[in-house]
C-alpha cells in the first residue's frame, strides 16, 4: 500500500538517513531546518511501510513589487531511495505536495534543482525556469562590513529588491542561512558601499567560499564582491541578480492555478536568492 503523509515519529529516522545519504547533511542541520524553516517536518511517501521518497515544504513568500506578497511552498530536500529511483515516486510526491500547497492557499511552488539536469525532471512535473542569477569571482578588497541580525538583514534585503520579483524569507529561515556555515567570516552582513548599503549572505567554506547572495547598487557589485572576499580572506564565488538576457536559470516555479498570473512579468529576471544549498 502506498501512503503519503507528514512523517510520523517512527519514520523520522529513515527520512533523516535518506536526507543525509542524498545531500550529506547531518542530524544537526536537519534538526535546525525543521525548527527554523519547516516545523511540520517532512512529507514522506511509503510503500508497505518502507520509505521511498521525502521532501520538505516550508512556506515562503513571493513578492511582485507593489502588490502584497503571495504565499508559496518551497520544495526542499526532495530525495528518493537510491534503489528505487526512476520508478516515479518523486513525481508522485511532488504532485501530492502541489495539492497540499493548493489546499493551504499557496499560489505556487518554488524549487532549486540540485543539479542542472534536474530542470528536466521538474519540467515534467509542471515547473518552468523562473529565476536566474549571475556568478562572478572576486578577490579580497576590504570595505566596511558588519554582521546583522536576521531581522535587520530582511529589512535591508527588501529595500534592495524593491521593484523586482523575489522571494521573501522569515527571520527563522534567515537564521538558518546564517548558521549554515560554522567557519569565521560566514554570516549575514551589511556592507557600506560607494552608492549606498548592500547586504550579503556569506559562507566561508575552506577552499570554496561562496556568497549565496550579494545585493547592492549595480555599480557597487565589484566593490561588494571584494568586501565579501575580504571577509573570507580568499577569492570567492558571488551570486548576484541577473539582468535581462544574462545569467543562468537557478530556480523553477509551478503556478498552482495552471498558469502564471498577469503580474508575473519579471520571468527569469526574478530573484530567488537563498536556496539553503
Image (tube, grey):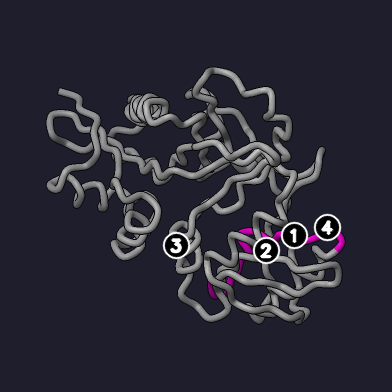
Task: Give the quadrant of residue 203.
Answer: bottom right
Secondary structure state at the residue bearing disc 4: helix
Of the image marks 4 and 1, the number of the one nearer the N terminus: 1
Q: Are there few (<14), some (14-19), or many (20+) residues within 10 Å of tag 1? A: few
Residue tagged 3? 176
Residue tagged 1? 136
Residue tagged 4? 218
Of the image marks 4 and 2, the number of the one nearer the N terminus: 4
Q: Are there few (<14), some (14-19), or many (20+) residues within 10 Å of tag 3? A: some
Of the image marks 3 and 2, the number of the one nearer the N terminus: 3
Magenta residues?
Answer: 205-219
Instruction: Tell me residue 132's x, y (percent).
Output: 68, 42
Cα distance between the residues tagged 3 and 4? 27 Å
Are the residues flagged by discs 2 and 1 in contact, CB closer than 8 Å? yes
Residue tagged 2? 237
Q: Quadrant of the N terminus?
A: top left
Amino acid at each position: 500500500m502506498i501512503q503519503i503523509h507528514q512523517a510520523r515519529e517512527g519514520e523520522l529516522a529513515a527520512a533523516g538517513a535518506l536526507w543525509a545519504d542524498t545531500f550529506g547533511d547531518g542530524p544537526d542541520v536537519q534538526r535546525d531546518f525543521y525548527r527554523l524553516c519547516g516545523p511540520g517536518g517532512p512529507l514522506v511517501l511509503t510503500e508497505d511501510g518502507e520509505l521511498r521518497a521525502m521532501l520538505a515544504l516550508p512556506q515562503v513568500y513571493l513578492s511582485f513589487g507593489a502588490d502584497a506578497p503571495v504565499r508559496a511552498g518551497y520544495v526542499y530536500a526532495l530525495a528518493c531511495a537510491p534503489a528505487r529511483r526512476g520508478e516515479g515516486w518523486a513525481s508522485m510526491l511532488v504532485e501530492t505536495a502541489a495539492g497540499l500547497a493548493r489546499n493551504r492557499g499557496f499560489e505556487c511552488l518554488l524549487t532549486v534543482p540540485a543539479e542542472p539536469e534536474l530542470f528536466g525532471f521538474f519540467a515534467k512535473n509542471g515547473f518552468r525556469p523562473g529565476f536566474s542569477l549571475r556568478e562572478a569571482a572576486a578577490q579580497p578588497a576590504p570595505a566596511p562590513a558588519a554582521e546583522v541580525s536576521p531581522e535587520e538583514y530582511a529589512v535591508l534585503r527588501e529595500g534592495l529588491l524593491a521593484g523586482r520579483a523575489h522571494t521573501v524569507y522569515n527571520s527563522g529561515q534567515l537564521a538558518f542561512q546564517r548558521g549554515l556555515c560554522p567557519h569565521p567570516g560566514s554570516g549575514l552582513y551589511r556592507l557600506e558601499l560607494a552608492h549606498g548599503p548592500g547586504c550579503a549572505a556569506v559562507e566561508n567554506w575552506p577552499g570554496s567560499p561562496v556568497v549565496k547572495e550579494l545585493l547592492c547598487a549595480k555599480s557597487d557589485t565589484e566593490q561588494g564582491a571584494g568586501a565579501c572576499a575580504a571577509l573570507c580572506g580568499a577569492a570567492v564565488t558571488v551570486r548576484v541578480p541577473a539582468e535581462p538576457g544574462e545569467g543562468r536559470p537557478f530556480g523553477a516555479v509551478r503556478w498552482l492555478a495552471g498558469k502564471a498570473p498577469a503580474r508575473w512579468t519579471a520571468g527569469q529576471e526574478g530573484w530567488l536568492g537563498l536556496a539553503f544549498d
